[in-house]
Image: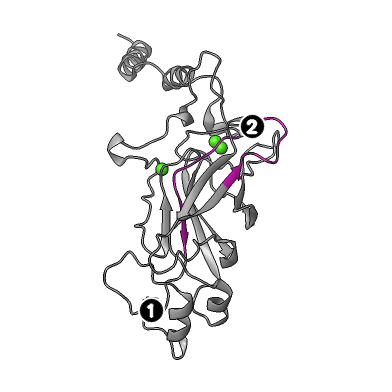
Amino acid sequence: MNKRYVVSMALLLISMLAGPPLIAQDQTKEEKTGSTPVSSNLRDPKPDKSGIQAPQKRLGLSAASGCQTSEYAPPQANDTTFVTDCDTGLDTGCSFRSEGPLVFNIKVNRVVGDVQKLKANDLISQTATLKMPAYDIDFFGGGGFYNPERDRVSFNGHVVPTEFLQGDDGIWRLNEFEVPIEWVNFPSDPGPSGTVTPADNMVRIDIDTANSEEVWCTAIDWGVTVQTPLPDPPPQGGRELLQNSYLAYSPSPCGRGLGGGG
Ligand SMILES: [Ca+2]
Ligand SMILES: [Ca+2]
Ligand SMILES: [Ca+2]
């Protein structure tokens, strides 16, 4: 047995033990996932003509989580935090422009009275915070072939100051926008024996505003508006103003001494 024969037998044995080449496995994987891999991030894949939905269309955690479709749980609602988790424009699956705009309503059920007066006396925050988890915002996508994803956010008809949703390919991102407190619709005072009718606050997302062709899709899980809670106890000289202006409606039974003198 010569030396060359031993070496070639050894090489044959090694190649048999190593199994099929890794490259072949990767190709098989890519063929299964379809034409354009999402990771290329040139554009979002659309549902094909057979009605089979693109991977992004199937959002959602377990059924046990109700309307929650992102990993961000909505905050607990209270008398300064107003939450909408289920609405027609929410939990839609990744939606393109022709499936939008995404519109949902945050109901505010707290009467505050004269916002300008409260603001002038530092008894209410200057701004409210609008929060929402947004899915798959390809803010840096397009690879030079298409404009990146620009989804415009409006609150009660006003475009929010920073205008667009932020995020990245294939992930949820919690977005926050500061809006002037005057943009928030509060319910009107129903009087001492009346019932508060919650005020509608409309959030609208115009999808993929930077491309003429439909390139990008997105989804929203929930929306929230938050105001800074009123000071408790009210500052010097503030109590009378609060009693006159910040009405008695409070779902919490603990009573903060803000009763509207009914
Ligand atoms: Ca994407
Ligand atoms: Ca997208
Ligand atoms: Ca939801």
Which residue is depicted at the point 68% across and 41% down?
209
As shown in the figure, which amino acid type bears the numbered disc 2? Answer: Val
* 67 shown above or below 181: above
Q: Quadrant of residue 158?
A: bottom right
* 43 vs 247, nearest the viewer: 247
Q: Residue 215 shows which numbered tag? A: 2
As shown in the figure, which amino acid type bears the numbered disc 1? Answer: Gly
Which residue is depicted at the point 54% across and 38% down?
218
Q: Quadrant of residue 95?
A: top right
* 219 vs 103, nearest the viewer: 103
Q: Is mark 1 within 8 Å of ligand 3?
A: no
Which quadrant of the render holds ligand 1?
top right
Region rendered in magenta: 204-226
Alpha-carbon neighbours of circle 2 within 10 Å: few (<14), some, or many (≥20)? Answer: many
Residue 246 at x, y = what percent?
Answer: 45, 74
Sequence order check, earlier mark of 1 and 2: 2
Q: Is residue 83 left or right of residue 167?
A: left
Q: Determine which residue is flagged by label 1.
A: 261
* 9 shown above or below 219: above
Alpha-carbon neighbours of circle 1 within 10 Å: few (<14), some, or many (≥20)? Answer: few
